[in-house]
Image (spheres, helix red, strand yellow):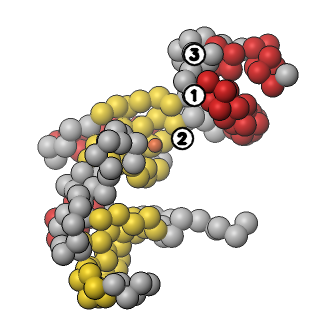
Amino acid sequence: MLCKKLHHAAYRCRDAAETVKFYTEVLGLKFSHAMGEDHVPSTGKYSPHVHIFFEMEDGSSIAFFECPQDPGEPSGRDPGTPDWVQHFAFEVESVEVLLQAKADLEAKGLKVIGPTNHDDFIESIYFFDPSGHRLELTARTCHDPVRLKSFEDEAPQVLALWEKTHDWSQRHLLFGSRSGYQRDQAANKEVSA
Ligand SMILES: [Fe+2]
Protein backbone atom coordinates (compact mmCIF):
# COMPACT_ATOMS: atom_id res chain seq x y z
CA MET A 1 0.00 0.00 0.00
CA LEU A 2 1.09 3.59 -0.61
CA CYS A 3 -0.31 4.76 2.72
CA LYS A 4 1.37 2.84 5.51
CA LYS A 5 -0.21 4.32 8.63
CA LEU A 6 -1.56 7.50 10.13
CA HIS A 7 1.16 10.10 10.62
CA HIS A 8 -1.06 12.87 11.96
CA ALA A 9 -4.44 14.50 11.62
CA ALA A 10 -4.44 18.25 12.28
CA TYR A 11 -7.10 20.55 13.70
CA ARG A 12 -7.29 24.10 14.94
CA CYS A 13 -7.19 24.74 18.68
CA ARG A 14 -8.34 27.66 20.81
CA ASP A 15 -5.18 27.86 22.91
CA ALA A 16 -1.98 25.85 22.45
CA ALA A 17 -0.97 25.79 26.14
CA GLU A 18 -4.44 24.63 27.21
CA THR A 19 -4.31 21.97 24.48
CA VAL A 20 -0.91 20.68 25.65
CA LYS A 21 -2.26 20.38 29.20
CA PHE A 22 -5.35 18.46 28.04
CA TYR A 23 -3.66 15.98 25.69
CA THR A 24 -0.72 15.24 28.01
CA GLU A 25 -2.47 15.27 31.38
CA VAL A 26 -5.95 14.00 30.52
CA LEU A 27 -5.11 11.57 27.71
CA GLY A 28 -1.44 10.90 28.50
CA LEU A 29 -0.09 11.59 25.00
CA LYS A 30 3.52 12.63 24.37
CA PHE A 31 4.03 16.30 23.46
CA SER A 32 6.52 15.41 20.75
CA HIS A 33 6.99 18.47 18.55
CA ALA A 34 6.19 22.17 18.34
CA MET A 35 7.01 24.44 15.43
CA GLY A 36 5.85 27.84 14.33
CA GLU A 37 5.96 30.35 11.51
CA ASP A 38 4.53 33.76 10.70
CA HIS A 39 3.86 32.63 7.12
CA VAL A 40 2.25 29.29 6.23
CA PRO A 41 5.08 27.17 4.74
CA SER A 42 2.94 25.60 2.01
CA THR A 43 1.10 28.73 0.79
CA GLY A 44 3.19 31.66 1.98
CA LYS A 45 0.12 33.35 3.48
CA TYR A 46 0.67 35.52 6.57
CA SER A 47 -0.77 33.70 9.55
CA PRO A 48 1.33 33.55 12.72
CA HIS A 49 0.76 30.11 14.21
CA VAL A 50 2.15 27.37 16.38
CA HIS A 51 1.81 23.73 15.28
CA ILE A 52 1.88 21.15 18.08
CA PHE A 53 2.02 17.35 17.88
CA PHE A 54 0.91 14.69 20.36
CA GLU A 55 2.20 11.20 19.74
CA MET A 56 0.50 7.89 20.50
CA GLU A 57 2.06 4.52 21.29
CA ASP A 58 2.31 3.51 17.60
CA GLY A 59 4.09 6.73 16.57
CA SER A 60 1.01 8.33 15.00
CA SER A 61 -0.06 11.79 16.16
CA ILE A 62 -2.89 14.21 16.56
CA ALA A 63 -1.76 17.77 15.86
CA PHE A 64 -3.13 21.28 16.31
CA PHE A 65 -2.63 24.82 15.09
CA GLU A 66 -3.23 27.87 17.19
CA CYS A 67 -3.60 30.70 14.67
CA PRO A 68 -5.02 33.65 16.60
CA GLN A 69 -5.17 36.15 13.74
CA ASP A 70 -7.44 34.02 11.57
CA PRO A 71 -11.23 34.29 11.80
CA GLY A 72 -13.52 31.34 12.52
CA GLU A 73 -14.24 28.86 15.25
CA PRO A 74 -11.44 26.76 16.81
CA SER A 75 -13.55 23.65 16.31
CA GLY A 76 -13.47 24.38 12.56
CA ARG A 77 -16.99 23.01 12.25
CA ASP A 78 -19.65 24.31 9.91
CA PRO A 79 -22.36 25.43 12.41
CA GLY A 80 -24.98 23.43 10.47
CA THR A 81 -23.13 20.14 10.84
CA PRO A 82 -24.05 18.15 13.98
CA ASP A 83 -21.26 18.15 16.56
CA TRP A 84 -21.01 14.34 16.55
CA VAL A 85 -19.96 14.16 12.90
CA GLN A 86 -16.37 15.40 12.92
CA HIS A 87 -14.37 13.54 15.53
CA PHE A 88 -11.07 11.86 16.19
CA ALA A 89 -10.96 8.30 17.56
CA PHE A 90 -8.10 6.84 19.58
CA GLU A 91 -7.94 3.04 19.85
CA VAL A 92 -7.48 1.60 23.34
CA GLU A 93 -6.43 -1.92 24.25
CA SER A 94 -9.70 -3.45 25.44
CA VAL A 95 -13.24 -2.79 26.66
CA GLU A 96 -11.92 -3.05 30.24
CA VAL A 97 -9.43 -0.25 29.53
CA LEU A 98 -12.23 1.75 27.88
CA LEU A 99 -14.47 1.49 30.95
CA GLN A 100 -11.61 2.48 33.26
CA ALA A 101 -10.85 5.45 30.98
CA LYS A 102 -14.48 6.57 31.24
CA ALA A 103 -14.26 6.53 35.04
CA ASP A 104 -10.92 8.38 34.98
CA LEU A 105 -12.20 11.05 32.58
CA GLU A 106 -15.33 11.57 34.65
CA ALA A 107 -13.20 11.88 37.80
CA LYS A 108 -11.32 14.67 35.98
CA GLY A 109 -14.63 16.48 35.43
CA LEU A 110 -15.33 15.56 31.81
CA LYS A 111 -18.79 14.70 30.57
CA VAL A 112 -18.54 11.31 28.86
CA ILE A 113 -21.12 9.62 26.60
CA GLY A 114 -21.16 5.84 26.27
CA PRO A 115 -19.97 3.15 26.15
CA THR A 116 -21.77 2.66 22.84
CA ASN A 117 -21.69 -0.60 20.91
CA HIS A 118 -21.26 -0.15 17.15
CA ASP A 119 -22.37 -3.28 15.33
CA ASP A 120 -20.36 -5.61 17.63
CA PHE A 121 -17.41 -4.13 15.73
CA ILE A 122 -16.18 -1.51 18.20
CA GLU A 123 -17.30 -0.07 21.51
CA SER A 124 -16.75 3.64 22.16
CA ILE A 125 -16.97 6.53 24.57
CA TYR A 126 -17.16 10.20 23.55
CA PHE A 127 -16.20 13.56 25.04
CA PHE A 128 -14.96 16.99 23.93
CA ASP A 129 -11.55 18.64 24.16
CA PRO A 130 -11.20 22.30 25.31
CA SER A 131 -11.51 23.60 21.72
CA GLY A 132 -14.77 21.73 21.10
CA HIS A 133 -13.36 18.82 19.09
CA ARG A 134 -15.26 15.62 19.67
CA LEU A 135 -12.98 12.78 20.73
CA GLU A 136 -13.67 9.07 20.84
CA LEU A 137 -11.90 6.29 22.67
CA THR A 138 -12.71 2.97 21.06
CA ALA A 139 -11.94 -0.70 21.65
CA ARG A 140 -12.22 -3.40 19.01
CA THR A 141 -14.83 -5.97 20.02
CA CYS A 142 -14.67 -8.15 16.91
CA HIS A 143 -11.48 -10.19 16.66
CA ASP A 144 -12.79 -13.02 14.47
CA PRO A 145 -11.13 -12.80 11.01
CA VAL A 146 -14.12 -14.51 9.33
CA ARG A 147 -16.53 -11.99 10.82
CA LEU A 148 -14.24 -9.11 9.91
CA LYS A 149 -14.06 -10.39 6.32
CA SER A 150 -17.87 -10.57 6.23
CA PHE A 151 -18.03 -6.88 7.31
CA GLU A 152 -15.65 -6.04 4.47
CA ASP A 153 -17.65 -8.08 1.93
CA GLU A 154 -20.90 -6.49 3.12
CA ALA A 155 -19.68 -2.88 2.96
CA PRO A 156 -20.49 -2.34 -0.76
CA GLN A 157 -24.03 -3.69 -0.13
CA VAL A 158 -24.51 -1.26 2.75
CA LEU A 159 -23.40 1.57 0.49
CA ALA A 160 -25.66 0.38 -2.36
CA LEU A 161 -28.73 0.38 -0.10
CA TRP A 162 -27.84 3.84 1.20
CA GLU A 163 -27.45 5.14 -2.37
CA LYS A 164 -30.95 3.82 -3.14
CA THR A 165 -32.84 5.22 -0.14
CA HIS A 166 -30.65 7.76 1.70
CA ASP A 167 -32.25 6.63 4.92
CA TRP A 168 -32.63 3.23 6.59
CA SER A 169 -36.33 2.62 5.84
CA GLN A 170 -35.23 -0.64 4.16
CA ARG A 171 -32.54 -1.56 6.66
CA HIS A 172 -34.22 -4.91 7.33
CA LEU A 173 -33.06 -6.01 3.86
CA LEU A 174 -29.49 -5.94 5.13
CA PHE A 175 -29.56 -5.96 8.90
CA GLY A 176 -32.54 -8.27 9.47
CA SER A 177 -34.73 -5.79 11.37
CA ARG A 178 -35.68 -2.11 11.53
CA SER A 179 -33.21 -1.50 14.33
CA GLY A 180 -30.02 -3.16 15.44
CA TYR A 181 -27.54 -5.06 13.35
CA GLN A 182 -28.60 -8.67 13.44
CA ARG A 183 -27.98 -10.02 9.95
CA ASP A 184 -30.43 -12.20 8.14
CA GLN A 185 -28.39 -14.08 5.55
CA ALA A 186 -31.43 -14.72 3.30
CA ALA A 187 -32.36 -11.03 3.33
CA ASN A 188 -28.74 -10.19 2.66
CA LYS A 189 -28.82 -12.17 -0.58
CA GLU A 190 -31.97 -10.31 -1.65
CA VAL A 191 -30.07 -7.01 -1.63
CA SER A 192 -27.13 -8.33 -3.58
CA ALA A 193 -29.40 -9.99 -6.20
FE1 LIG B 1 -16.07 7.20 15.24
Q: Residue drawn 53% across and 14% down?
A: 179
Q: Residue drawn 30% across and 81% down?
A: 34
Q: Is mark 1 within 8 Å of ligand 1?
A: no
Q: Residues within 10 Å of mark 1 (few under 14, many from 20)?
A: few
**Contact (Cβ within 8 Å) of mark 1 with mark 2:** no
Give residue 166's mark.
Answer: 1
Give coordinates of residue 170: x percent, y percent: 63, 16
Compute the Cα span from label 3 to label 1.
Answer: 9 Å
In the image: residue 140, left or right of residue 75: right
Question: Which amino acid type is shown beneath numbered disc 1?
Answer: His
Label 1 or label 2, whichever comes before in sequence order = 2
Q: Quadrant of residue 18?
A: bottom left
Q: Which residue is mark 3?
A: 169
Q: Which residue is mark 2?
A: 140
Q: Residues within 10 Å of mark 3 (few under 14, many from 20)?
A: few
Q: Nearer the viewer, residue 8 or 171?
A: 171
Question: Which amino acid type is shown beneath numbered disc 2?
Answer: Arg
Residue 30 shows up from this direction: no
Compute the Cα span from label 2 to label 3.
Answer: 28 Å
Residue at disc 2, secondary structure: strand
